């Protein structure tokens, strides 16, 4: 691949497209041309700058069990010293993670911990029901485990699933958990379970006791991390920086450019049809194509058309609308019990009556 030359059309200027373009420029002689339909880079990892206020499109934290991925991020934006009050403009900050669930109009730590606050918020009877339900899931798990509902029940018990997982998950994905594959849970939640949540809680307590912290494991599930790195000006900053590097190395980035057609010849990509911001349609030859556009649009844009079965499958794919509302406050009256400002990175609104 490194000896080949030619034009690679990269559809989409989000993390996938930008990472691919930079990799091509570093390791090959191919020239990437990024076509991004929006007027800025980053996809749903972009950060909007509204009158100096930076608003993330979606919640993102930078943490991976892969050293290769972590090192790649840090290569783009080097980490600032932890606690540095004036970090460099292009740097990664170390952020303490704090996530909570709002349920019964009360805050619960997330991931759910076996604490007195949790028991107090739920009440003794509700806590007892959760415990019994979990024991039943251990004794008689749902088999076969086909849906996300089965996945949650087998790992947390039916009562805890209905309390903290069912309503929120259905609101996010727009369909009942019984209609979502169990494989989704295996990918998103991976090894998280009640046992691991309790183990993590116990470990965090032991670490505070010098004599006992030798019994603590350094391994941690992604869902249980205490800290993560985060670009100084939001996740969009890292992709804007990658875009700058791509341009410096000879790649091209065309914003406001939507790919509308993929013309094939002898089963291989030959030409790309695209529409620019002024409404004009153009065609360009492509030696290779890397696409991060929705699979449905990718398949339907091909000419000649893909096989009927492929088109039917692609047409049936369901996408979830993504809407972010940014609220700017001159003064936030929401406070912690000690009067300090809220420190949450993320709050899950579990209340069933909140749409």
Image (spheres, rainbow, N blue to C red):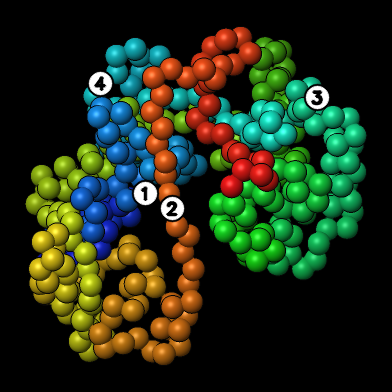
Dots 3 and 2: beta carbons under 8 Å? Answer: no
* 247 horizontally vs 97: left or right: left
Q: Between disc 2 and disc 4, whose residue precedes?
A: 4
In the picture as drawn, the residue positioned furthest to the top comes out as 338
Q: CA distance from mark 2 to mark 1?
A: 9 Å
Foreground mark, 2 or 4? 2
Category of crowding for the residue at label 2, using alpha-carbon neighbours closer than 10 angstroms: few (below 14), some (14–19), many (at least 20): few
Q: What residue sits right under mark 2 in the picture? A: 322
The structure residue drawn at horizontal position 64% and vertical position 33%, both measured from the top left corner, is 102
Image mark count? 4
Category of crowding for the residue at label 3, using alpha-carbon neighbours closer than 10 angstroms: few (below 14), some (14–19), many (at least 20): few
- In this view, the residue in front, 141 or 98, is 98
Q: CA distance from mark 3 to mark 2?
A: 35 Å
Q: What residue sits right under mark 4 in the picture? A: 88
Q: What residue sits right under mark 1 in the picture? A: 44
- In this view, the residue in front, 120 or 295, is 120
Query: Which percent across, then down, holds residue 187?
Result: 57, 55
Foreground mark, 2 or 1? 2
Q: CA distance from mark 2 to mark 4?
A: 32 Å
Query: Which percent across, then down, holds residue 131?
Result: 86, 40
The structure residue drawn at horizontal position 25% and vertical position 85%, both measured from the top left corner, is 303
Local secondary structure at mark 4: loop
- One can see residue 14 in this view: yes
Local secondary structure at mark 1: helix
* 126 horizontally vs 265: left or right: right
Where residue 241 sits, quadrant-wise, is top left
Q: Between disc 1 and disc 3, whose residue precedes?
A: 1
């Amino acid at each position: 691949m490194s000896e080949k030359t030619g034009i690679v059309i990269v559809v989409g200027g989000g993390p996938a497209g930008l990472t691919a373009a930079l990799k091509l420029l570093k390791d090959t002689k191919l020239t990437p041309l990024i076509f991004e339909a929006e007027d800025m880079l980053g996809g749903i990892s972009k950060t909007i700058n509204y009158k100096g206020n930076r608003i993330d499109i979606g919640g993102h934290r930078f943490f991976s069990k892969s050293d290769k991925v972590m090192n790649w991020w840090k290569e783009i934006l080097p980490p600032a010293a932890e606690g540095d009050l004036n970090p460099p403009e292009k740097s990664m900050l170390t952020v303490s993670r704090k996530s909570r669930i709002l349920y019964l109009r009360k805050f619960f730590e997330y991931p759910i911990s076996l604490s007195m606050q949790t028991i107090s918020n739920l009440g003794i009877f509700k806590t007892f029901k959760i415990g019994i339900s979990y024991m039943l899931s251990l004794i008689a798990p749902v088999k076969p485990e086909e849906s996300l509902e089965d996945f949650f029940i087998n790992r947390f018990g039916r009562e805890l699933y209905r309390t903290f997982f069912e309503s929120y998950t259905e609101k996010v994905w727009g369909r009942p958990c019984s209609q979502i594959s169990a494989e989704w849970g295996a990918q998103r939640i991976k090894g998280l379970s009640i046992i691991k949540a309790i183990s993590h809680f116990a470990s965090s307590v032991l670490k505070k006791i010098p004599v006992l912290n030798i019994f603590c494991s350094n391994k941690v599930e992604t869902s249980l991390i205490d800290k993560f790195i985060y670009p100084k000006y939001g996740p969009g900053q890292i992709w804007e920086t990658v875009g700058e590097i791509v341009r410096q190395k000879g790649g091209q980035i065309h914003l406001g450019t939507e790919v509308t057609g993929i013309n094939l010849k002898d089963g291989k990509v030959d030409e790309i049809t695209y529409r620019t911001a002024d409404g004009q349609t153009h065609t360009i030859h492509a030696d290779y194509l890397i696409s991060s556009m929705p699979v449905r649009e990718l398949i339907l844009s091909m000419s000649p058309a893909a096989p009927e079965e492929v088109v039917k499958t692609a047409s049936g794919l369901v996408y979830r609308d993504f809407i972010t509302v940014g609220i700017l406050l001159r003064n936030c009256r929401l406070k912690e019990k000690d009067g300090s400002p809220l420190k949450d990175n993320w709050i899950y609104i579990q209340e069933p009556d909140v749409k």
